[in-house]
Image (tube, helix red, strand yellow):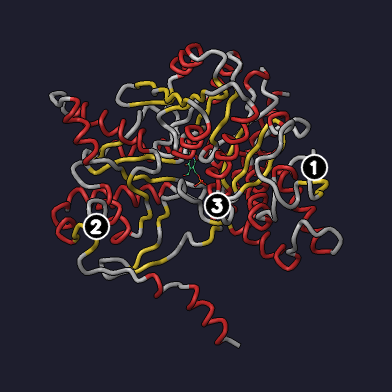
Amino acid sequence: MQRVTDAAKMTRQSASAALLEKIASRVIGLDLEMPVATGKSARRVYLDSTASTLRLEVVQHVLDRYQPYYANTHSTVHFGARLSTREYDWAHEMVLRFVQADRARYSAFFVGSGTTGGMNRVARTLSRQLEGRDVVITSIMEHHSNDLPHRKHFREVVHVPLETGETSMGCVDIRAIERALKEHEGRVAYVAITGVSNVTGIINPVYDIAELAHRHGALIVVDAAQMIAHMPVCMSGNADPARDLDVLVFSGHKIYAPGSPGVVVARNELLLGQEPEEVGGGMVDEVHIDRYVPTAKLPDREEAGTPNITGAIGLAAGLHALDRVGMDIVFHEECELMGYALDHLARLPDIAIYGETDLERYPRAGAISFNVRGMHHALTAAILNDYYNIAVRNECFCAHPYVREMISHALAEADDALSNEELEALAELQRGMVRASFGIYTTKADVDMLIVALKDVAANRAYYESQYEACGSDSFQHKTFRFEPDQFFSIEGAVGEWLAGK
Ligand SMILES: Cc1ncc(COP(=O)(O)O)c(C=O)c1O
């Protein structure tokens, strides 16, 4: 019997792996060929999925099939409106299914401008809903989107530190969260934590944090901007209900969808009982000159105005495709790639990797940040792009406190004679990193290409430095090679082309 179960499991795994291979190999723009500074051309190696993922062909297929029927979901009778409304509703259901949230107790709704839009809405809503609770606990690892909205809407935001691993910082320090919860007992509205860091890819134990927060009467809000595309999420139905998540926020553009619909999934009771934050069309049952009555229906009451229908449908298409594969399989593949990439990067003596690299203790997903020792992050990123067509991001990734902390930590490790003031001054001067980040389409060959490029940069540092001039303090321009975007695309040019066509 056991053997039959194992065989069934293996069949499922290989079917899922084949599906993943099909989805991941058909991606729009992945093989973009561009002229580079050597005078040749190179195929794009896209290592910037943490910023935005590329669009999957399956998503584009769904959008192309849908587009002829496109209509406003607030119209109700004509064919296009009925079809659009049904699919837009289905997109909400798909989100709930994807994050394993009980449909009877949770609602998903779309907001504008990604996770930032969602997190601002959550902070505004919960600050009113949880009146009297005026403290939010977050960590120093957070993206500004999971920090500033809480600062704006609550009296106090506590930033807890991270654990210290063998060589560097690891995940958020759960004991520090516990201390903060105790210190502010009765005042904490929620603990707002990222599932996965957008700088180091380090994964936080969000279900343990949920349990802890709930034990102290606080909620948990998870920033899933990075978690969502890399690992399974289970909002409800955990063996211990205390480990369920109250609110989760993410963005479509981080998970292969077009545009940037923001998504909030929350327990219904957190959304009801007060007037919705945003008012206008679509969220109201009755409007008179002297009063109006918001609908009690979720998610409608949270979605004032015409929604981003195309964005939601594209997002649901991507989620459905990934759900067919299974996020456990996606995560498994990703762990292997992450291990491979870290192992190969760590072998390069000129590369400083940020964040603890012991994957057993601190698993990671999606991103690795590093610097070529002694080289400005912006110069490294420019060389990777201009000579290799390797797309990475640099600077501080909207996570200034975390980046500053890690750079100071690395500087202190390298030179223990530095005073605190010297450390701070140096960290400010060198503030920034290079980030290589992955999506389902990233391969070991892409990582190999990065390693080849970094070895070359380190070995020929003087040559590369001589090819660039600094423009201000944070960017470098090649002295002779120029990229002219409108040679490749401009809206004006593309419209002109179409108008001139037959
Ligand atoms: C962890 C994390 N949170 C929040 C955000 C903000 O997302 P958006 O740009 O979609 O608002 C990002 C974007 O990089 C992120 O990585």
66 and 292: which is toward the camera: 292
Rounded to the nearest whole Å, what is the CA distance between mark 2 and mark 3? 33 Å
192 and 187: which is toward the camera: 187
Rounded to the nearest whole Å, what is the CA distance between mark 3 and mark 1? 47 Å
Quadrant placement of the C terminus: bottom right
Does label 2 or label 1 sit earlier along the sequence?
A: 1
Give, as a three-letter code, the residue at label 1.
Val
Q: Report whether 363 appears left or right of 421.
A: right
Callout in the foreground (2, 1): 1
Secondary element at tag 3? helix
Task: Name the residue beneath numbered marker 2.
Answer: 476
Secondary element at tag 2? strand
Task: Name the residue beneath numbered marker 1.
Answer: 293
Q: Residues within 10 Å of mark 3 (few under 14, many from 20)?
A: some
Image coordinates of residue 295 in percent, x first then y, are 79, 42
x 56%, y 36%: residue: 231
191 and 125: which is toward the camera: 125
Q: Is residue 93 visible?
A: no
Q: Quadrant of residue 121?
A: top right
Q: Report whether 479 appears left or right of 144.
A: left
Task: Name the residue beneath numbered marker 3.
Answer: 24
Does label 3 or label 1 sit earlier along the sequence?
A: 3
Give, as a three-letter code, the residue at label 2.
Phe
Q: Quadrant of residue 159?
A: top left
